[in-house]
Image (cartoon, rainbow, N blue to C red):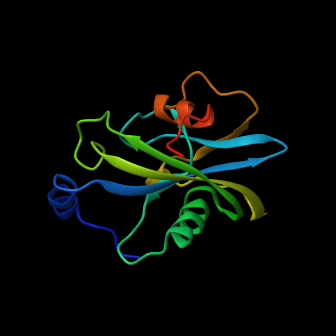
Amino acid sequence: MKFLSKKVWNIVFKKVPRVTVDIVIKDGRGVLLIKRTIKPDIGKWHFPGGTVQFKEKILHAVRRIAKMETGLQIRIKRFLGIFEFMRWKETGYNHIIDLVFLAEPTRGKIKGNPKFGGKTLNFFKKIPSNIIPDQRKILKGKLIK
């Protein structure tokens, strides 16, 4: 899959919202989170998630991103809702329409990816204090239904 150059990214996402998916991967160990090593919010915990690519089906994006960021194959259990992020000033992060899915791991070995989020992953039964604030809201069910 070919990703946008930074130049094209800035041109496109200065004009239109960015469509993303976030994946709440949950099993008996809790919810799987990644410690961010990329902007924005470096050092905070977050869900696996990312941009839906042009001509990519949404459910394909969910599976691709889960595998790319966690090393896991997943089973999508259900759509949780829509969340809009409008808190960052950086282009591409200033208006995000986020589709949130609940999933469970089916196979694979947990392995982070520093290029796409972070290499430290952990399951949590309680929400960590240093989770991205908007994602805390998602875990508390504050989505557009």
Task: Indicate the position of residue 142 as horizontal and vertical percent values.
Answer: 55, 34
Q: Residue 130: percent from the left, percent from the top?
A: 54, 24
Give the camera-side residue of 81 and 71. 81
Considering the image in quadrants, where does the N terminus appear? bottom left
* Occupied quadrant, residue 137: top right
Query: What count of labels does the image hold?
Result: 0
| x then y, percent, for residue 109 | 74, 60
Residue at the far right in the pictured view: 28
Q: Is residue 143 left or right of residue 6?
A: right
Name the residue located 31 percent from the left edge and 44 percent from the top edge: 93
29 sits to left or right of 122: right
Of the pair 58 and 93, the residue shown nearer to us: 58
Picture layout, residue 134 above or below residue 102:
above
Relative side of 97 to 11, left or right: right
The single residue placed furthest to the top in the displayed view is: 129
Residue 125, quarter of picture: top right
Q: Residue at x 72, y 27 (%)?
A: 126
Q: Looking at the picture, how far across and down is residue 72, in whole percent?
A: 69, 62
Residue 4 vs residue 142, the one in the foreground = 142
Q: Which residue is drawn at 55% across and 72% down?
A: 60
Asked whether, in this view, residue 59 is left or right of residue 87, the answer is: right
Q: Which of 139 and 41 is in front in this view?
A: 139
